[in-house]
Image (spheres, rainbow, N blue to C red):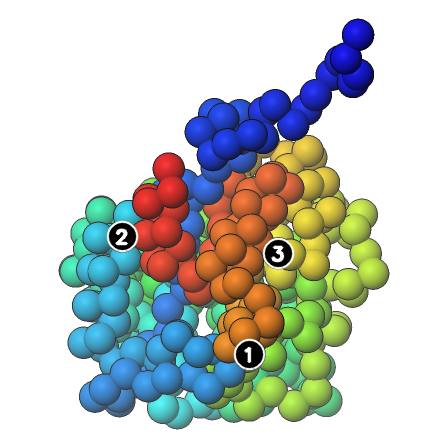
């Protein structure tokens, strides 16, 4: 009798059978591409620590948004880089502020062909770089910040955004944003809560992308990387406050969190493959140390396998093209 009787390798013997039995597929429709737009630019500008990602001008953003739709990505997450910042981050609330202007531009360009999302946080707009307003002694003032988030959410919804992404990790932010949107007649605008967001060193290149002026760190509001159960508590609170979708961020170093969150809630779970995750792979690939495309798709598959149904990734447009060839 030949041994062994059970041969798992049969289902790996060629590409066709592997494709047939693959448990996880990444669909371009589940990818969301983050985009940066900088006030006053006439030409897009590269970001040194995020090779291949641009700070867009208003014009180039519209073109990039149209290309993203063409590529079939599920959504676009917008970040604004203002020319001037102040103590309270008023540029985030001003309808003429760069992010609100960019939302209008992108919605005018793409309509309902993809989901237009916006980061709802003050850090790009404050002179001190924190995600909220400060008390006189320099602490981040939770409840005063909530008022600003409520106004910012309404400004973004007025500009036509489909989904707001509160990312500042203030207590109660989802409830306040939901109530403000409803009171302003924006019941249809959904909330993607950055529910489990860690105080991560993987955000490094993003700070270059938005020219962050942060001094100090965000450890008094973003989560300690040591904690998993705390994420479940954050996610449950956000769902109770009205979050339509919840997000874990970063992604690859926190796949255990993605998996636990997926098991804990029934709303769609997103994961954000952040700037540092992208930059590490790009840097290693530029040195010829890894196969860039294979690593890219392997990371996305892993995030999907862990339970994220939606993935925010700077590779979204390129990965969508690769995935289309593959399946
Ligand atoms: C906050 C925000 C950050 C990122 C997304 N939204 C920065 C931070 O919390 O410090 C990071 C994304 C990335 O690193 O790709 N506006």
| Quarter assignment of residue 44 | bottom left
> Viewer-proximal residue, 55 or 240?
55
How far apart marks 2 and 3 lie (CA) works out to 23 Å
Residue bearing the label numbered 1: 287
Query: Element type at marker 1?
Result: loop
> Viewer-proximal residue, 62 or 245?
62
Asked if residue 50 is positioned above or below residue 178 in the image, the reply reads below
Q: Would you say 12 lies left or right of 3 here? A: left
Residue bearing the label numbered 3: 251
Q: Would you say 28 lies left or right of 195 here? A: left
Query: Element type at marker 3?
Result: loop
Comparing marks 1 and 3, which lies closer to the viewer? Answer: 1
Q: Residue at x 70, y 55 (%)?
A: 254
Q: Earlier in the sequence, mark 1 or mark 3?
A: 3
Q: Residues within 10 Å of mark 2 (few under 14, many from 20)?
A: some
Q: Earlier in the sequence, mark 2 or mark 3?
A: 2
Residue bearing the label numbered 2: 71
Asked if residue 313 is positioned above or below residue 45 in the image, the reply reads above
């Amino acid at each position: 009798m030949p041994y062994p009787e059970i041969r798992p390798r049969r289902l790996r013997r060629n590409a066709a059978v592997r494709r047939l039995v693959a448990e996880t597929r990444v669909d371009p429709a589940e990818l969301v591409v983050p985009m940066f737009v900088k006030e006053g630019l006439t030409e897009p500008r590269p970001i040194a620590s995020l090779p291949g990602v641009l700070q867009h001008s208003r014009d180039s953003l519209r073109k990039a948004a149209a290309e993203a739709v063409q590529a079939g990505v599920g959504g676009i997450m917008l970040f604004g880089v203002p020319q001037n910042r102040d103590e309270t981050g008023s540029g985030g609330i001003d309808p003429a502020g760069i992010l609100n202007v960019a939302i209008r531009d992108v919605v005018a360009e793409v309509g309902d062909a993809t989901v237009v999302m916006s980061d709802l946080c003050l850090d790009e707009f404050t002179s001190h770089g924190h995600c909220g307003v400060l008390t006189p002694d320099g602490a981040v003032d939770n409840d005063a910040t909530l008022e600003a988030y409520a106004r910012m959410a309404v400004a973004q919804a007025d500009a036509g955004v489909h989904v707001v992404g509160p990312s500042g990790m203030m207590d109660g932010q989802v409830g306040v944003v939901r109530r403000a949107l409803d009171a302003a007649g924006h019941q249809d605008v959904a909330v993607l809560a950055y529910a489990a967001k860690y105080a991560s060193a993987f955000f490094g290149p993003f700070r270059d992308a938005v020219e962050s002026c942060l001094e100090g760190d965000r450890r008094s509001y973003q989560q300690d990387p040591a904690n998993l159960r705390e994420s479940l508590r954050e996610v449950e609170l956000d769902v109770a406050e009205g979050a339509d979708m919840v997000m874990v961020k970063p992604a690859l170093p926190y796949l255990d969190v993605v998996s636990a969150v997926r098991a804990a809630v029934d709303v769609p779970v997103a994961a954000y493959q952040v700037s540092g995750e992208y930059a590490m792979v790009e840097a290693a690939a530029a040195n010829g140390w890894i196969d860039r495309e294979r690593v890219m798709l392997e990371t996305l598959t892993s995030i999907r396998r862990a339970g994220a149904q939606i993935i925010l990734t700077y590779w979204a447009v390129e990965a969508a093209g690769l995935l289309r060839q593959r399946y």
